[in-house]
Image (cartoon, grey):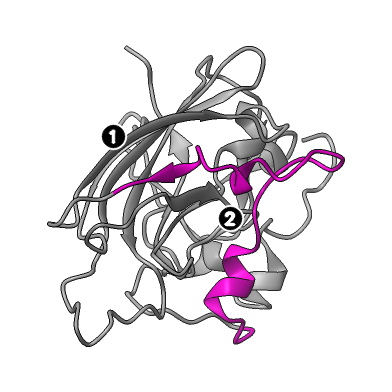
Amino acid sequence: CDEDPSNPYYNTTLYGNTNPWNNSVNNRYQTNEKGQANHAFVMSQVGIGSRGMKGHVAIVYASDGTTKIGCGVLKNTFNINSMQADIQSYAGYKSPVNNKKVAPSGTVYVMAFEDNVLRLRGSLDGLESNCVKCGIHIHAGLSCNIFGNGSRSNNNNSTPDEIVGDHWFASGQDDAWKAQKATYTSDAKGHANFAFYVYNGYDFEDNVDHALVVHGHDNTRIGCGILKPKEVL
């Protein structure tokens, strides 16, 4: 904050010259007569994880939108190791003609232990029926390519698969997501309860904000959700 902050920070690969901080109506605060404000909001279109944000500055602007009146450096303020992803249909996915009800939904919870082993558990509906040992994996991308206005596109016209990326695991590690245990099995109604442990070489901070992908029978990507921190009560 001792230096003049640079331009707003966001993933230019995803959003090009379109500054998402300018396009959001949520990142505005309102003060009372004493100049006090309490505000919380979610910015889902920045395209940068929490580790990438750490050390950058947060700027408070005056009512004119240009005068900088406050500044602070982003640091870790939480002591949690639990994440969750709310799953919805994968961008661009179309159910087979003979199985029109495939529309994944539900929540997946991920716990990162001290040795960086991950426990994934969840309950999902709307899956393909009788999908035996179908994959559910953390991917490298920080977006499911689903934007606040409901569109499934981006400024650079990248495909959903390019946005979501491949399996997320540390360099030098075997791809843990290829293991048979990183799977779920659905019943005839397309419901699945699952729990398994996996080690991808990354800790909590390196996994949070990444895309969690649900696969179908032929490994087709049918569902996606972004892992967000979850308070452990």
Residue 69, image x, y percentages:
60, 42
Residue 31, image x, y percentages:
34, 39
Residue 63's mark? none
Q: What element carries label 2?
A: loop
Q: Farthest left residue?
A: 189
Q: Which of marks 1 and 2 is nearer the N terminus?
A: 1
- What residue do we see at 58% from left, 55% from top? 142
- What residue do we see at 19% from left, 57% from top? 190
Quarter location, residue 222: bottom left
- For the record, the magenta segment spans 156-185
Where 24 falls versus 83 (above or below)? Answer: below
Magenta-span inclusion, residue 93: no
Q: Is mark 1 on a helix, strand or loop?
A: loop
- Does the image show residue 35? no
Taking depth in this image into account, of 174 and 206 the one nearest to the observer is: 174
Secondary structure, magenta segment, majority class:
loop
Query: Which amino acid type is shown beneath numbered disc 2?
Result: Leu
Given this view, does label 1 or label 2 mark the residue nearer the observer? 2
Q: What count of labels does the image hold?
A: 2
Residue 142's mark? 2
- What residue do we see at 50% from left, 60% from top? 64
Residue 201, image x, y percentages:
73, 32
The quarter of the picture where the N terminus appears is top right
Quarter location, residue 183: top left
Alpha carbon of mark 1 to alpha carbon of mark 2: how far?
Answer: 39 Å
Taking depth in this image into account, of 172 and 227 the one nearest to the observer is: 172
Query: Which amino acid type is shown beneath numbered disc 1?
Result: Glu
Magenta-span inclusion, residue 164: yes
Taking depth in this image into account, of 81 and 2 the one nearest to the observer is: 81
Residue 121, image x, y percentages:
36, 32
- Residue at image mark 1: 33
- Does the image show residue 209? yes
